Image: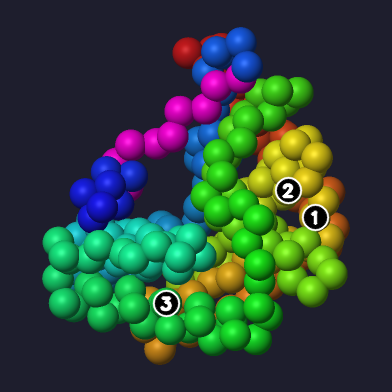
Amino acid sequence: MANEVKQRTRIHTVYKTADSKRVPSVTTILGILNKPALLTWAWQCGVNGLDYRSVRDDAAGVGSLAHYLIMCDLKGEKADTSEYSPQDLERAENCLLKYWEWEKQNKPEPILIEQALVSENLGFGGTIDCLAKVGNEFWLVDYKTSKAIYPEMIYQLAAYKALLSEHKHIINQARILRIGRDDIEGFEEKQFINLDKAFELFLCCKRIYELQKEIK
């Protein structure tokens, strides 16, 4: 199982329409965006004498493990962490503990977990972290283990909401749940009811992505 986690960090899901046409993922489309926070972070690593690639890979590994632990918890599965170091596991479990606090307060009832969806109408795909029923509402929840909630995460959420809507799912609200990998990185939750402008921006990114491919 741990091998599957590591493999998922290297291999992206392939999304295809009903007629077997391959379509880009939400994250691939948003990859065209400039990410100034990432450049600032890389520069700061250099100032501190750190190799940003090693720091990035370490954070990504812990983030992927934390995400895996949360998904296993949602599915009621036992996570296989035998191939991970005690240090990485401790940091990932710190994220899980924070998630459990949120879960205890909101009591979500999962409907979809890590569900891959494709838009036949617009030609893109994405994997939803969780669609859950909370009380009388249906929440789209996206889990992040980053240091902050960045604008592209909101555009991503808007695209996921559109995917769910096309597949006839009701969404009363969408949320990003950011779970820091340690106490310094903290915990943050943002609720979004209207994502129309964010989705409009995503569609603009999709058109730019398509034009760039045509030019190449």
Label 3 with label 1: CB-CB less than 8 Å:
no
In the rendered image, which residue does mark 3 sit on? 96
Would residue 80 be visible to someone looking at this image?
A: yes
Q: Picture coordinates of residue 175 (x, y %)? A: 68, 66
> Residue placed at 51% from the left, 82% from the top?
100
From the viewer's perspective, tell me whether residue 144 is left or right of residue 188.
left
In the rendered image, which residue does mark 1 sit on? 171
Comparing 71 with 208, the one in front is 71
In the rendered image, which residue does mark 2 sit on? 161
Label 2 with label 1: CB-CB less than 8 Å:
yes
> Residue placed at 66% from the left, 71% from the top?
108
Comparing 183 with 2, the one in front is 2
Q: Identify the secondary structure beneath mark 2.
A: helix
First in residue order: circle 2 vs circle 3: 3
Query: What's the amino acid at mark 1?
Result: Ile
Say if 97 sits above or below 20 in the image.
Answer: below
Q: Picture coordinates of residue 137 (x, y %)? A: 82, 66
From the viewer's perspective, tell me whether residue 103 is left or right of residue 174.
left
